[in-house]
Amino acid sequence: MMSDVKSPAQGKLVRKVVIPALAGGAVGFGTAWGVGELIDGGFVSGLTLSAEIALVAGALYLVMALGVLIGALRPGFGARYLNVEDADELRETRAMLVNSCIAMALWGGGLVALALAAPGPLAASAALGAGLAGFALGAVFAWRSWQASDELMTAVTREANSLTALFAFALLGGWGALAHAGYLDAPAPLDLLTTFFALGLVATFVVVGRRGMMRLD
């Protein structure tokens, strides 16, 4: 009897949490592996360790943006793997999601461009121009996503931004203090950008979880 009661909840747990978590891990690993193959194969050369890490982070932003964008444009399919109640929720939030995905893709592309700057394959001026353009245009679409958000998502975005700032102060401030005291190497300029990108994702997941938006009921 107990197994009959638990079965639907367990099925939803697998469908909404376990499978997306495994898929996300596979996508992250696949993206890192693909970038590594490009570097090892000589298609991308001359990168520092900081640039390689930034390249992986930017590629992850691009892959995540594509995955969510596909789900937003095809709600019936997206409801199977995105953390939403049903396809109708995706239809209702499509404008917000599409603009958010475009912003993520532009930011990821901007970070990729900067990662490829000389001594990588891109001239420093071209990489800087592409990077700044990606960040600026991404901010425009992020603002459009903000305007299309409901009260809950507006609050989530605000809290995630605040938490990102706190995380950045703690991590980068601690890193800077330890580097100043001679215990660690100082962060490279590109490390600062990559850290903000990574902490933004972490903060978003923390806020979403804290608000109970990943519950199964």
Image (cartoon, grey):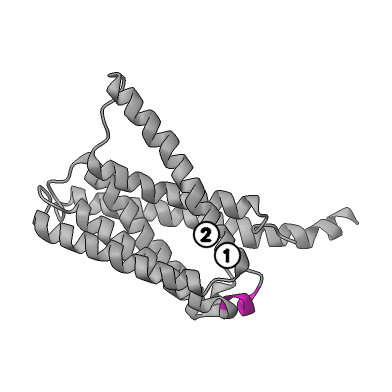
C-alpha gap between disc 2 and disc 1: 6 Å
Mark 2 surroundings within 10 Å by alpha-carbon count, few (fewer than 14), some (14 through 19), many (20 or more): some
> Helix, strand, or loop for circle 2?
helix
Residue 35: give x, y in percent of width and height.
27, 53
Q: Residue type at mark 2: give it.
A: Thr
Mark 2–mark 1 CB contact (< 8 Å): yes
Q: In which quadrant of the rendered image does the N terminus lie? A: bottom right
Which quadrant, please, contains the C terminus? Answer: bottom right
Name the residue furthest right: 1
Name the dominant secondary structure of the magenta segment: helix
- On the question of residue 115 being in view, the answer is yes
Residue at mark 2:
157
In screen coordinates, is 52 left or right of 153?
left
* Whether residue 204 can be seen here: no
- Identify the residue shown where x is 23% and y is 65%: 133
User: Is 127 covered by the magenta stretch?
Assistant: no
Q: Residue at x 62, y 64 (%)?
A: 152
Neighbor class of circle 1 (other Cα within 10 Å; few <14, some 14-19, many 20+) is some
Residue 138: numbered disc: none
Position above or below: 6 against 165: below
Left or right, residue 134 beside residue 216: left
Residue range of the region highlighted in magenta in the rendering = 86-90
State the image quarter where residue 100 is shown.
bottom left
The residue wearing badge 1 is 153
The image position of residue 177, as x and y in percent, is 34, 25
Q: Quadrant of residue 3?
A: bottom right
Query: At numbered mark 1, what does the secondary structure look like: helix, strand or loop?
Result: helix
Looking at the picture, which amino acid does disc 1 mark?
A: Met
The number of callouts visible is: 2
